[in-house]
Image (cartoon, rainbow, N blue to C red):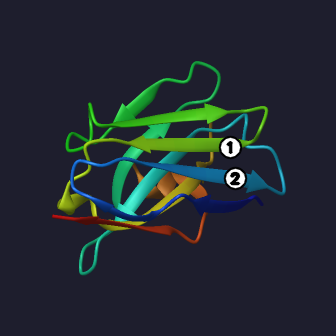
Amino acid sequence: QVQLVESGGGLVQAGGSLRLSCAASGRTVSSVAMGWFRQAPGKEREFVASISWRTAVTYYTDSVRGRFTISRDNAKNTVYLQMNSLKPEDTAVYYCAAASSFLASATPGNYNDWGQGTQVTVSS
């Protein structure tokens, strides 16, 4: 099992930027895909971005493509989500997750381990 701890959330004005970090401990996550999901109040958890192992292939949901960038530093056992041009509709709790394989996925069921989440609030 791996423990994931997100950080970097906060309050930002529309158009601003935030960088989320996800630090993994307990075991290395360098051999599995990693993902970011988010959940807004009253809504289901939704996929944001994922990154595969080795080739670092990335996937994004349409609403964030071109504004968000997922990256990973396997040496530091850390995954990042750079969020630019933030919009009020990006407001949510953001969760980091470790997949069960090296393949990037948008399906929550393909992720075994989840962090506790970090709040991102974008004001208009």
| Residue, disc 2 | 23
- Residue 83 location, quadrant: top left
Q: Residue at x 21, y 39 (%)?
A: 62
As rendered, which of 96 and 100 lies closer to the eye?
A: 96
Question: Between residues 16 and 2, which one lies in front from this camera angle?
Answer: 16
> What is the C-alpha distance between the residues marked 2 and 1?
5 Å
Residue 103 seen in this snapshot: no
- Which residue lies at the image location 79% right of the left edge and 32% below the top edge? 75
How many residues crowd mark 2 within 10 Å: few (<14), some (14–19), many (20+)? some
* Res 41 quadrant in image: bottom left
Percent of width and height locating residue 30: 73, 35
Residue 110 screen position, x and y as percent? 51, 51
Residue extending furthest toward the top:
55
Residue 85 place in picture, x, y as percent: 25, 43
On residue 78, the disc is 1
For the image, the number of numbered tags is 2
> Is residue 52 positioned above or below 79 on the image?
above
At horizontal 53% and vertical 58% (from top left) the residue drawn is 8
Q: Are marks 2 and 1 in contact (CB under 8 Å)?
A: yes
SS for dot 2: strand
As drawn, the residue found furthest toward the left would be 124
67 horizontally vs 113: left or right: left
* Labelled disc at residue 10: none
The quadrant of the picture occupied by the C terminus is bottom left
Locate residue 64 relative to residue 113 in the image: left or right: left
* Residue type marked 2: Ala
What residue is shown at x 19% (from left), y 61% (from top)?
Answer: 89
Which secondary structure, mark 1? strand
